[in-house]
Amino acid sequence: SVVVVVGAVAMLVAVAVVVLVRRRRREAKPAVVVMFATTRGRAKSLAQRAAKRLSKHRRVVVMDAKDADPWEALFHKEVRDLVLVMSTAEGGAAPATARRAMADLDEHSTDFRVGAAALRGHRFAVLGLGSSAYVEFCLAAKAADKSLRKLGAARVACEYLDDSSHDEDEKFEKWLSKTTAALSRESPVVVVPERKKPKKRVPPSESKDVEDTAVMVTRRQASSLTKEGYKLIGTHSAVKMCRWTKHQLRGRGGCYKHTFYGITSYQCMEATPSLACANKCVFCWRHHTNPVGREWKWHTDDPIEIVDKAVQLHVGMIKEAKGVPGVIAERWRAAHTVRHCALSLVGEPIMYPRI
């Protein structure tokens, strides 16, 4: 009987060791983040179901997109895999609690400083929820999918559920099975570049060299710059909130000017009095969305008006950051006073005749 008891104890210990080893192996792997953005709770419910299935194979962290900096772990390589479950609000927008997070993701995908390979080696799955009765069906989820691919992440599964469809549950299960099969193991990912769409033919009026026109910025260039977050001033200037300003507002580090000279990044304004550049270098990281000109041949705006408008627009962007998760109230208030201006946007500022 003693032998039987000892044998039983040994077996229990062995089972416990096996369970412990498996658990530690699972915990040692990078976590899968399951992020949801919900309007009525359905996205959260489906995200929890997905997390439960994935947790059998991987360590899983469930996150609401309203939380502070949902992309922080992703961009800092702490997380390699993401599952995004996104509801659709009015007009195809992301739910109100997730709009700031989605705007940040979109900005990352268009910021030349981040780069198109920022998420190379990462994998993601997207599940959009909406109604096909609307033109903007799952528009927010599709935008997030596009931004993640632009940043180099590899999509393993994608589905858009129509809440008026009878096969919604079947499609969800199919998507979840595909997602689980892909993310249950950490295998090398081959990133297939997105197929480029044929370039639209540019009207002759828009393709002229900027020196041939009286206005520096064409409508096409203005549209492109605006999409990248630039606030245009007058006929040749612009301002944009620097990513380091946003970082320091949230209590993180500043740029080299803070490191070398003690300048607080959250009180720094990034602007330019000339969107035109004298060159179009092949190695330039600014995507050539700005005008090009070898000498100044355009209308010259008043410098006082440029500075006043730049400060006004910059402070307006600071005000919009109020209530953003992670923003420190004391720094937000101090940021309303601009103490430094970096002329480091697109273009060549010294081209401006009244610099």
Image (cartoon, grey):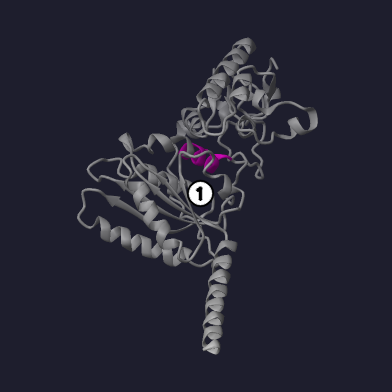
Q: Which residues are magenta?
A: 102-111
In the image, residue 339 above or below residue 157: above
Q: Is residue 99 above or below residue 143?
A: above
The kind of secondary structure element at disc 1 is helix
Question: Can you give x and y, in whole percent of width and height, for residue 87 in the image?
Answer: 35, 44
Is 211 in front, or is 314?
A: 314
List the residue tagged with mark 1: 150
- In the rendered image, residue 197, in percent from the top left (x then y), is placed at 43, 50
Residue 210 locus on image (x, y percent): 56, 29
Dominant secondary-structure state across the stretch colored magenta: helix
**At 27% across and 40% down in the image, what residue appears?**
135
Closer to the camera in the image, 150 or 324: 324
Q: How many marks?
A: 1
Answer whether residue 86 is visible to the viewer in this image.
yes
Question: Which residue extends farthest front?
Answer: 1
Position of residue 11 measured from the top left corner of the image (x, y, whole percent): 53, 81
Residue 195 drawn above or below residue 186? above
Q: Is residue 134 magenta?
A: no
Q: Quadrant of residue 49?
A: bottom left
Name the amino acid type tagged 1.
Lys
Which of the 4 quarters of the picture holds residue 93?
A: top left
